[in-house]
Amino acid sequence: MDGRGNLDLRVVKIERGFMPNAEGSCLISMGNTKVICSATVEERVPMWLKGRGEGWVTAEYAMLPRSGKDRKPRDTGKPDGRSVEIQRLVGRSLRAVVDLKALGERMITLDCDVLQADGGTRCASITGCYVALAEALQTLRLKKPALTDSVAAVSVGILGGVELLDLCYEEDSRAMVDMDIVATGAGKYVEVRGTAEGRPYDRKQMDRLLDTANVGLETLFRKQREALGEILAP
Amino acid sequence: MDGRGNLDLRVVKIERGFMPNAEGSCLISMGNTKVICSATVEERVPMWLKGRGEGWVTAEYAMLPRSGKDRKPRDTGKPDGRSVEIQRLVGRSLRAVVDLKALGERMITLDCDVLQADGGTRCASITGCYVALAEALQTLRLKKPALTDSVAAVSVGILGGVELLDLCYEEDSRAMVDMDIVATGAGKYVEVRGTAEGRPYDRKQMDRLLDTANVGLETLFRKQREALGEILAP
Amino acid sequence: MDGRGNLDLRVVKIERGFMPNAEGSCLISMGNTKVICSATVEERVPMWLKGRGEGWVTAEYAMLPRSGKDRKPRDTGKPDGRSVEIQRLVGRSLRAVVDLKALGERMITLDCDVLQADGGTRCASITGCYVALAEALQTLRLKKPALTDSVAAVSVGILGGVELLDLCYEEDSRAMVDMDIVATGAGKYVEVRGTAEGRPYDRKQMDRLLDTANVGLETLFRKQREALGEILAP
Amino acid sequence: MDGRGNLDLRVVKIERGFMPNAEGSCLISMGNTKVICSATVEERVPMWLKGRGEGWVTAEYAMLPRSGKDRKPRDTGKPDGRSVEIQRLVGRSLRAVVDLKALGERMITLDCDVLQADGGTRCASITGCYVALAEALQTLRLKKPALTDSVAAVSVGILGGVELLDLCYEEDSRAMVDMDIVATGAGKYVEVRGTAEGRPYDRKQMDRLLDTANVGLETLFRKQREALGEILAP
Amino acid sequence: MDGRGNLDLRVVKIERGFMPNAEGSCLISMGNTKVICSATVEERVPMWLKGRGEGWVTAEYAMLPRSGKDRKPRDTGKPDGRSVEIQRLVGRSLRAVVDLKALGERMITLDCDVLQADGGTRCASITGCYVALAEALQTLRLKKPALTDSVAAVSVGILGGVELLDLCYEEDSRAMVDMDIVATGAGKYVEVRGTAEGRPYDRKQMDRLLDTANVGLETLFRKQREALGEILAP
Amino acid sequence: MDGRGNLDLRVVKIERGFMPNAEGSCLISMGNTKVICSATVEERVPMWLKGRGEGWVTAEYAMLPRSGKDRKPRDTGKPDGRSVEIQRLVGRSLRAVVDLKALGERMITLDCDVLQADGGTRCASITGCYVALAEALQTLRLKKPALTDSVAAVSVGILGGVELLDLCYEEDSRAMVDMDIVATGAGKYVEVRGTAEGRPYDRKQMDRLLDTANVGLETLFRKQREALGEILAP
């Protein structure tokens, strides 16, 4: 739709240190989708975790009012259903690669603030938060590393009967099937969520979607490594 | 864990007409999980749908305070994140088998109220709501049938390295992977959501989980047909 | 209006143990009015009671969205005025027959969830909660019994100049006077609330309403005893 | 307790026109209880009444933070349960003496703001609102008078086994039984609410309480007439 | 506009002890603007001040629904933006003349409740709260006086090119510039807030406005001294 | 404190077009303070303005959670008092230079989202919003220009007895007096708000503060012109 091949990611950029007050942060762009990811370390844990010697990783997600084509009013009261769903997914995805015991009694809050929204903001949030988290964890100089793997996410979908990688908003809104895949650098799934917006899909289509996602994930892991540079080196 | 084989569903019962004021309703039990599903038909559509000649199907989900082992305070303000996530899933799942044009400018609200919670309440809600919806649609005597297929849902998981069908709460809380599968009677997927709570899973495991789900879905579709009886017959 | 005599209660049924997770519970039906009553025992008291060696009994009341002819949206934010008024009445009525010192530093929450509403839900809630409460108290095996009396409630009204017992919704909405009487098994009043919806009433009418209520209360106390069976026996 | 006989009202004063911006208003004092009552007339009715040619009368009730011995935080969110219960009672009581058809499609809001609270604020609110309402209705110069009767309220109670009239806060908090009686000038009851705070009461006691109330109501109706003066004269 | 000269205050009255339950209080009138000011002393400080040996002074502001020409709905949820702005200003202004160390670990809450609003309610609140505060502080019999100066406030504005003192509502709504000046008895500024509602103003105009304010402030400080009488005398 | 002279602004940068979806936008930096300003044009006006042929300009202000040294929780419910105060100031300041009749029945919403907070965010918001607004107005190609002047804002203060220009957070929190000046390019004041945080200030000090502000404002107007370039040229 935008000149890419079906198996091409949009242009990916990860700019580390975008929020200098945060312990870790980056601005991640996937085409016209841009998300500020920041990681805050606090020396406390939620009430229900106190005294267990373990830490916690959680996430919050919001869109700037003018991140989209139309202005979206700010949340009043609790965040809307969609935001809650996304921030739960982001938190769960990052916890999957953190050894909470190694983290110790600390809480890391990952803030995802969408500057520009053109599809795939939840996947960009996960991919970017990994970079912010790794940067923040390095500042702690833990004896035992708390990161057990890397994690990234990409969307795939079926549009006009064809599998597509990394859907932009226009593609996403017209796709019959929309699947988000969160996977680790070691090739395992943290989350697979395939949703038929219109027509249900069969098992063969599902297999092809998972293959398509793998192509994109490989690039995303490379971009993360490049952004983190010396942080990943032992 | 409760004497069942790994591929056994818990005892399923669907009692139609449980809420006599509603246009359609049932009480669905899957073992100790019990959900009241009711369908309300209103001759109006949400603002954003007005004048398009189409209808809408939406869902709400809540738990009675004493549905679980401990008392859960009632929602104040907006429903919590988990409830929002579930009711969006239920609505989407049922819309996947409804021809909204055939429904006409009407809104159907599916209320899922959990009487007893022992794991799998979202799957039971979907399976039960199909029965309530079918009953409600019949009262409309539409010229063109609005139901295009049936829909049911089941959970599968990996516990102790083994695939399990229809997890109860105890099993669910100990499972490494938890997957909800929403599928149609025609064998297509509406939603597949596989979440690694602890250890990520690989592709082979994913395939085995999908096979396991099929075993349970078959039984659920049969139970729905039995409950609906004459309603399904032409 | 529904074939009953003016001094006839609707058909009363009390099904104990309806919510097996609760310490005490029942489903009470008075004709087409059905309320789930459950009692939760917690080993804590509200802040303001701490350290006094006394317990507390409180109530919450809500209607399932499709308990009535039309769908009633769920409460968002605080419960509406009517629900608050009812739950305060239910709590006060049950506390009137509980020795809070004998209860000790415990809190009992009575949840009234209306499955079907056809008039008299607050009276049914009180009558049913007594059964749930007695069942819950028995599980505590207190040295000194905490129940000092039984309690039940019934509505009476004036419709077409005639006194009626146990008004259904249709009768209630047309009655000129509506009175709820909460009384103990020993024949004393806990609460009398007579409200003129249209035309005020004089003292003679009030006397006749109280006589009418007594007829119904006698039956309700008998139904409670039958439901509790061995629990009441020493 | 404060030197009065058991059948003596506290000193009653009604100062009309206390809120000059309102269509009708007064400051009513019953001993140390002081309530500002104001009536606002608006040329609109609530949505659900539109087009029926009838009006509506409603009430709101709040306490100034320092009306009592301790500072009471202001309501945030909806008014608390007690305030809701009171404002519903005040609205219902005043509607009992208004011919809503004669009022026409108008809404009258009665605001009760408690300056000083020493027991009996809901009764003082009703008695004072009648004066504010009568003043406001006169400004409308309706062809057919909208007031069908007068209305006032008084509390009675049982303390130390003796019936008392018009309880102050200290008496009220120690009374075993507390009863509010709302009655019309023609001697009919609009509302009788007798609540046992501690020990339930029998029918004889109830009869004596109603007799006691009549003594106080007579004085209140006279005070209202004196305050309204020329307004009541034809 | 109302017969006053441009440099005349409206009629000022300060009636001390208006809320007898409060530690200090007054009713202040400036023409048709009337505000109840009360001061509550509590032997506690906000969380963030604990253990520092200092006190705190804060304010709340609200309007009775019928204080103005039209009925203003009561705040639901948080107070509106304007009320928040005013109560922050009142708190800050009074803290400017209190030695918080001399106050000790106590909190004083100043409640400003507007009975009648005809312009200048925030200035009247500040001027009146000083009287309530001084009365409340006297009851504490502190060794070292906590009041370091007096404080009062007045509005000035430009209407039709002319400087006006103490604007009533009608004048305020037509003024091009509106300025509130909060000053101490010793002639220093606590707050100067000049806002151009329509046409911006230049520096000469600003100087003339400050001169005009001084005329009014002098009278207000005298009225405060008269109201406090013996309290100010050593 | 940070090496600047007392009359030096921090480094000012205005990067236009930062939010490409918005009709006008910029990222404004004043030293370490960075605010995203965006202007949204909508072809509607608030209810109360309908049919008058005039437009409206309003503002919203929020901080990203990690804009400061510590993480600030997101607003739930209404924005906090400080945010409300700021967004009202921003809206008023920009309306002072817009001819609302020339704008026509349109609404412009200015969103100020703080990326980094180091003092002076409200002044930066006003200065940046002027640029976003001018850019947005140009897209409308109005016959009669809606901008009547430019507007910018700067803070000044007294710290250690000396007047300072453009306070950073550290300076601001230690200043005895803090003044925000909003002025137009033509040299008139829109708003002057001088607040004594600790010690009140006299008239001479006020005069010196206004002189100091003028120095900074001149630079800000030049930066705005540079950023807008061809937009300002006829």
Image (cartoon, coloured by chain):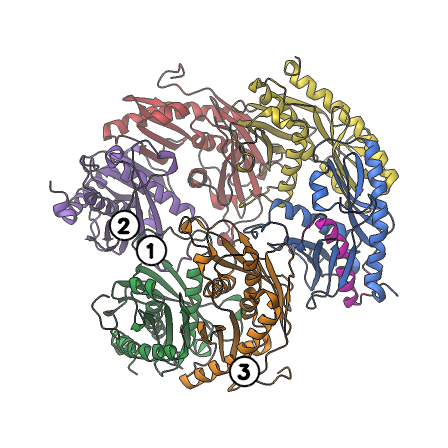
Chain colours: A green, B orange, C blue, D yellow, E red, F purple
| Residue C81 visible, this angle | yes
**What kind of secondary structure does the magenta stretch mostly adopt?**
helix
Is any part of residue D160 visible from this angle?
no
Of the residues shown, which amino acid type is indicated by label 1?
Leu
Residue F20 image point, x, y percent: 23, 55
Label for residue E104? Answer: none
Give the left or right position of residue C129, taking residue F203 as reference.
right
Residue type at the position of mark 3 = Leu
- Bounds of the magenta span? C117-146
Q: Which quadrant does the N terminus of chain B fall into?
A: bottom right
Q: Residue at x 34, y 79 (%)?
A: A208
Q: Secondary structure at mark 1?
A: loop
Image mark count = 3
Vertical arrangement, residue F73 with respect to residue C199, above or below: below
Quick check: B197 left or right of A205? right
* Residue A76 percent across, percent down from the top left: 44, 51
Distance, label 2 to label 1, CA atoms, is: 10 Å
- Cβ atoms at labels 2 and 1 below 8 Å apart: yes
Most foreground residue, F218 or E84: E84
Q: Secondary structure at mark 2?
A: strand
Q: Which residue is mark 2?
A: F38
Question: Which label number is shown at residue A64?
Answer: 1
On whether disc 2 and disc 1 are found on a single subunit, the reply is no
- Crowding at dot 3, Cα within 10 Å, few <14 / some 14-19 / many 20+, comes out as many
Q: Quadrant of residue E123?
A: top left
Where does label 3 land, which residue?
A: B164
- Spatial distance from mark 2 to mark 3, Cα to Cα? 53 Å
SS type, badge 3: strand
